[in-house]
């Protein structure tokens, strides 16, 4: 007598990604460059004539918005382009000191393998971004918008959407500063802040992102529909 075959339950289909496109910031989101920036802070202050940052002030400044930090340090906005050029050149000379955060490479490859398109919008230079990302990671990005001014990311987001023919409603923007969130909201993107970069949780929450992430793994689970959204900014404030 033959044993009746036991019917196996059908495998569940993988959930569809929540977004067709994810736009990443670079410094503080993909690249762990915060300590390097702090290491040249006094040099920048002396060169561009603004207040030095005492070690006791650093944590407090992380809890402020980008505009509040500029006011506190007495940095005039007209100095920002020259500062950016100098910082990018210095970083290029010391690029070996910068690496990607743990888990970032796996995140980028997993999103791409699951059909999520990737773009990069950063204030840093294209050469610096390429050097830190490396060729394999760089090849995953369909669009690079580099050299954005400190408060000029919104037009870069719009350019990415137009070139990639993706709607704002189908796009998630991920950054580590309040200015990233504000620019995303101007364009109508879903915005997310990461808690492993520059700004503290309270500062990011005050900018009202749609969600906050504590690790690259959280990003993967959320974007790929493997988990519910992490707590909203309102819930974490």
Image: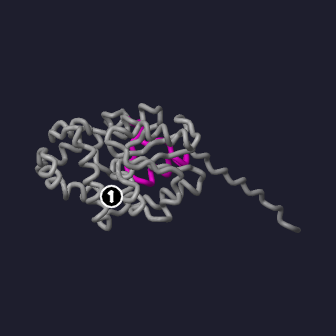
Q: Is 205 displayed left or right of 47 in the figure?
A: right
Q: Is residue 208 above or below residue 117?
A: above
Question: Which residue is at a point 33% across and 48% down the rendered structure image?
Answer: 195
* The magenta stretch spans residue 231: yes
Total marks shown come to 1
Question: Which residue is at a point 26% across and 54% down the rendered structure image?
Answer: 87
Q: Position of residue 217 (x, y in %)?
A: 45, 54
Question: Which residue is at a point 39% across and 40% down the rendered structure image?
Answer: 153
Residue 100: quarter of image: bottom left
Would you name the residue on which mark 1 appears? 32
Q: Secondary structure at mark 1?
A: loop
Quadrant of the image for the N terminus? bottom right
Q: Is 169 displayed left or right of 92 in the figure?
A: right
Residue 232: quarter of image: top left
Q: Position of residue 37 (x, y in %)?
A: 24, 55
Q: Which residues are magenta?
A: 209-232
Quadrant of the image for the C terminus? top left
Relative depth, front residue between 51 and 30: 51
Q: Position of residue 108 (x, y in %)?
A: 49, 56
State whether residue 9 appears in this view.
yes
* The magenta stretch spans residue 14: no
Q: Is residue 213 above or below residue 71?
A: below
Relative depth, front residue between 31 and 135: 135
Q: Position of residue 22 (x, y in %)?
A: 50, 46
């Amino acid at each position: 007598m033959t044993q009746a075959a036991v019917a196996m339950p059908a495998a569940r289909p993988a959930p569809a990604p929540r977004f067709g496109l994810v736009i990443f910031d670079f410094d503080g989101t993909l690249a762990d460059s915060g300590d390097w920036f702090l290491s040249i802070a006094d040099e920048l202050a002396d060169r561009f004539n603004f207040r030095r940052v005492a070690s006791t002030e650093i944590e407090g400044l992380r809890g402020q918005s980008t505009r509040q930090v500029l006011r506190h340090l007495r940095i005039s906005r007209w100095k920002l382009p020259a500062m950016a050029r100098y910082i990018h050149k210095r970083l290029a000379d010391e690029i070996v000191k910068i690496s990607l955060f743990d888990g970032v490479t796996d995140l980028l490859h997993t999103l791409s393998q699951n059909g999520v398109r990737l773009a990069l919008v950063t204030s840093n230079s294209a050469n610096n971004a390429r050097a830190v990302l490396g060729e394999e990671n760089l090849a995953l990005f369909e669009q690079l918008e580099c050299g954005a001014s400190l408060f000029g990311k919104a037009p870069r987001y719009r350019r990415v959407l137009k070139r990639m023919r993706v709607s704002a409603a189908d796009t998630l923007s991920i950054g580590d500063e309040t200015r990233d969130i504000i620019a995303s909201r101007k364009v109508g993107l879903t915005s997310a802040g990461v808690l492993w970069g520059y700004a503290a949780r309270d500062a990011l929450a005050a900018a009202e992102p749609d969600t906050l992430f504590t690790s690259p793994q959280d990003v993967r689970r959320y974007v790929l529909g493997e988990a519910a959204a992490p707590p909203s900014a309102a819930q974490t404030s």
